[in-house]
Amino acid sequence: MHMQREGGLTAALAVGISDRFMFGLSYGASKLIGDDEPIPYPRPEVIFKYRIVDESMVFPGIAIGIDTQGFGNYNEADSLQRYDIKGYGAYLAASKNWRTPLGNLGAHLGANQNFTETTDGDEDINLFAGFDLEFNPEFSFLAEYNAALNQNSMTAESIALSRGGYLNAGLRWSLFQNFHIELHFKNLLFDDEKVSYFNRELKVNYIEYF
């Protein structure tokens, strides 16, 4: 479950049917929490992920996938017909982990192309990167950067147009092995001519093994 600005809520369920392949669905609504009328997303979004190369001491793990779930509100009334921040669509990602005196350090790099939110005419290939660092077995620091190369033509007034991509950071609290709570600080490079604040969001993850 991902709780976001203006009472939005997105829920996703994904199942790994092997050590390499995972699939699932996500769905949500804007203004679901609060006293405004909820605005459902136009469709369920899909999740597919397959790890094609295992991580080794030298080389990163590599995965391909599809994730059409965008971030923020869906601007259905706007001519762009898209989420505030586009979903990844089809992507290729590489990840490498190292042990540090504090805990695990993970670095991630990828490229994606969104094929469902193209009404704005911007179908460029996008780049993204991130890292996570464990302070101890319970707390981790997260950071990611989305270059937003495929959303240069934003016009919706509600979108906080970023200067040079989206920088996000967060903290993860792992209460138990299967249950994690994350506090996100989104769009830290916000355009102060449009907004005077960054987004704060809450995410709850539950993972079960069978």
Image (tube, grey):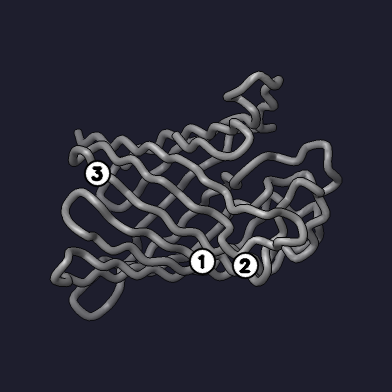
Kind of residue at badge 3:
Ser
List x then y, in percent, for residue 201. Answer: 50, 43
Who comes first in sequence, dot 2 or dot 1?
Answer: 1
Q: Position of residue 161 (x, y in %)?
A: 72, 59
The quadrant holding residue 113 is: bottom right
Above or below, comparing residue 54 to residue 177 in the picture = below
In this rendering, the count of numbered labels is 3
In which quadrant of the rendered view does residue 208 lie?
top left
Which residue is identified by label 3?
A: 174
The answer to whether 107 is drawn above or below residue 188 in the figure is: below
Residue under circle 1?
145
How packed mark 3 is, by other alpha carbons closer than 10 Å (few <14, some 14-19, many 20 or more), is some
> Where is residue 13 drawn, in percent x and y?
42, 34
Determine which of the numbered discs, if any, sits on residue 165 in the image: 2
- Three-letter residue code for mark 2: Gly
Q: Tell me the distance, in whole angstroms, between the alpha carbons under discs 2 and 1.
A: 7 Å
Residue extending farthest to the left is 101
Residue 66, image x and y in percent? 51, 52
Q: Secondary structure at mark 1?
A: strand
Residues at circles 2 and 1 in contact by the CB criterion of under 8 Å: yes
Label 3 element class: strand
Q: CA distance from mark 3 to mark 2?
A: 29 Å
Residue at 30 percent of width and 73 percent of height = 60
Q: Which residue occupies the foreground of this view, 210 or 42? A: 42
Badge 1 local density, few (<14 within 10 Å), some, or many (20+)?
some
* Residue at image coords 76%, 61%: 193
Looking at numbered disc 1 in the image, what kind of residue is underneath it? Tyr
